[in-house]
Amino acid sequence: MFLLKVGDKLKIPGFKKVIPGLCFNRFQLRDEFESNHWYVALLESCIQSKSLSQGKIIHQHIIKNNSNIKDFSIILDKLTHLYVKCNEVELARQVFEKIPNPSVVCWNMMIRAYAWNGPFQQAIDLYYKMLQLGVTPNKFTFPFILKACSALQDIQVGQEIHKHAEQLGLEMDVYVCTALVDMYAKCGDLFQAQTLFNCMSSRDIVAWNAIIAGFSLHTLHNETMELLVQMQQAGIVPNSSTIVAVLPTVGQANALSQGKAIHGYSLRKMFSDSVVVGTGLLDMYAKCHHLSYARKIFDRMKQKNEICWTAMIGGYVACDFMTNALALFDEMVHVYELNPTPVTLASILRACAKLTNLNKGQSLHCYMIKSRMDLDTTVGNSLISMYAKCGMMEDAVGFLEEMTSKDTVSYSGIMSGCVQNGHAEKALLIFRQMQLSGFEPDLATMMALLPACSHLAALQHGACCHGYSVIRGFTSESSICNAIIDMYSKCGKIHISRKVFDRMHKRDVVSWNTMIIGYGIHGQCTEALSLFHESQVSGLKPDDVTFVAVLSACSHSGLVKEGKYWFNAMNQEFSITPRMAHYICMVDLLARAGNLDEAYIFIQRMPFEPDVRVWSSLLAACRTHRNIEMGEEVSKRIQKLGPESTGNFVLMSNIYSSVGRWDDAAQIRTIQQHQGYKKSPGCSWVEVSGIIHGFIGGDQSHPQSASINKKLQELLVQMKRLGYSADSNFVLHDVEEEEKEQILLYHSEKIAIAFGLLNISPSKPILVTKNLRICVDCHSAIKFMALITNREIIVRDASRFHHFKNGICNCGDFW
């Protein structure tokens, strides 16, 4: 037994501190009854003060003296409550499981703990276990379990729980109905949410906030603001939670004037002192691209938590102020010693990706491993994107394989990275791996996969993506339709691109630009300009990319007059200042048409310093028109700027080779090797039955090489009979003419065409894609091949499409 004097503070052995506020007016606490009440009183005090450490000591004492406890379930109930209050959910669960017959209050307590802290599925599992044991839920159970459904976006379970509430006659209870409105809204069923809300006989501010937050969550700006007005008309005054709910959709809609009005209201009501409201306001201003306002709010906030810092960093990232984002992140971590959240890391990794700041990204990766945040899926996806943008695909793929929790975004990110880094075929393999892992492709997956199909000219894969997108309803989005248009265009099916374009319900400027660019690379400039005029009639405002498309189309078809007109019209009629890409198009247009001197003067008069790409366009024309003197001058300028790739070395070497200056050609190749540039080998590929077959020049590695060689030799004999003579001007070696003929015969595109002739049905065209521009000899030879075989042969080179039919190419020998 325990002896106490009147007024003594209650203390037990092992306590370092006395529990405050507990006085007993009895001299003695006798074994069973007294010890029961003693523990309950102690635990209640710990619950009120959230004294976890003292609560654990009491728990230990209970375990040691459990023989003296009469009603153990009350004690366990209090212990469960204590651990829930102190956010020790797993400890609470262990104690809860030992309660013989938990009351509905205790069940609610555990369900609420999981609904607020996760794992959310545990809340649902507990709810169904409670039903199985015959415990009837009450009106407090449903708000907790419905919150878990909202967090999981599990509308099916939510609907089932809705039926349970109806069966118990609790559907119209204001708390239950508000929770149902919130669940349906967050799960995307706004119609059901609105229906329930309208049926409520009594709506308090919590109910109004739930429906407003639901519409705001789904970026329905007009509907959200209309509900806000209705709320005030009903006599309900918006509170700080209302403001926090409305601000995101205001920012998304870029409704700055409304945002300022809400800001003013918050100041009058003294809401802006709240860190939550302040964070919402700065986030709204950032989304409206008013970072100066956002930063002022941030700087004036008296208290800043991690979410507030994250919002400001995210604002900088969204507005493309990546350096500022990194500086603020460093201040947050190193000056204020705050721990970044997963959202903070995801934002800052985006900044690293945009700046290609690999060192910072790698240091963040180390921090993530130490803090175990690399297990967070969102952070992991951002890390994949960072490595991909920095060109570190091995690291990106390696991290993907290590991720314990992947989603479709993980795979989409790695596929996009593969395409951006020139590994489109790897993207297709990753997609296959994703399917085998049981993930269902979503819209983002298609947006990542379609460019891979475009790059490889993988028509069969691309058509499958198109069909899948139609079935899933993705084609209601203009972005996916734009990707499909681009895919068909780059797979040689420009007429299908136009069909997709014409059937679009809503076209944006990207849709028009993609279609115009498609016509341009297929050499159909008349159609490109016609579509451009059509866009003007429709009221579309062109952007700078539109004029890149128009000028490029003029360049591919040699329409110098039209190109000059639209270049001048950019500034004069559309107030668009030409940038480097437009000047490159104009130089290409003038030079390709043979106006080399005019192109040179045009470059000299540019308002800014021309880059390597501008001079490279002129150098390519010097090769075509064999202007050695200007070619040498341009080559020197390129060398001063620093060549971006091997292409310029190859062009100059070709110029010398075309006039038999073999020593000069060899010297250029020596300089190229000395500076560490390696020539990209000519590579061509063709799709047969959904499989991509790749070939390089002189390739003998393919299983069908013997048949391919035989086919090429047969074609050579037939071509010679029709007057073909190999054009050896661009063979880079001083060898005999017969040897040059054999070298030219085994260029990669010719090998691919021979393979296509052997394996593709005669009724179907052969589409070959090449990584470099097609040479003069191959262009001439393929015209003969198309005539001899009576086949349509389409070659997509690095510049444009060539449609060969009946011995003619649609480029008119102008490329």
Image: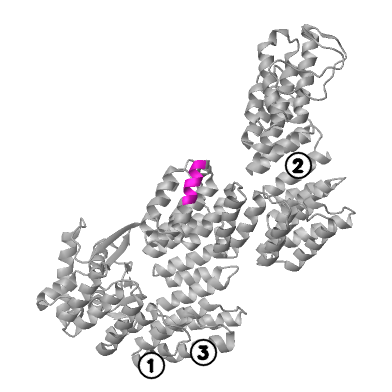
Task: Please name which of the two marks, 2 or 3, marks the residue nearer to the observer.
Answer: 3
Callout 3 environment at 10 Å: few (<14), some (14 to 19), or many (20+)?
Answer: some
Which residue is labeled 1 in the image?
598
In the picture shown, does residue 697 fall above or below 701?
below
Q: Is 786 situated left or right of 310 in this image? A: left
Mark before the other along the chain sequence, 2 or 1 = 2
Question: Marks 2 and 3, how far apart in space?
Answer: 61 Å
Q: Is 167 situated left or right of 728 in this image? A: right
Q: Name the image quarter holding the C terminus.
A: bottom left
Q: Nearer the viewer, residue 254 or 470?
A: 254
Q: Is 512 situated left or right of 748 in this image? A: right
Q: Is residue 365 magenta?
A: yes
Which residue is labeled 2 in the image?
179
Q: Which residues are magenta?
A: 363-370
Q: In this view of the protein, can residue 173 be seen by the observer?
A: yes
Q: Which amino acid type is marked by label 1?
A: Glu
Mark before the other along the chain sequence, 1 or 3 = 3
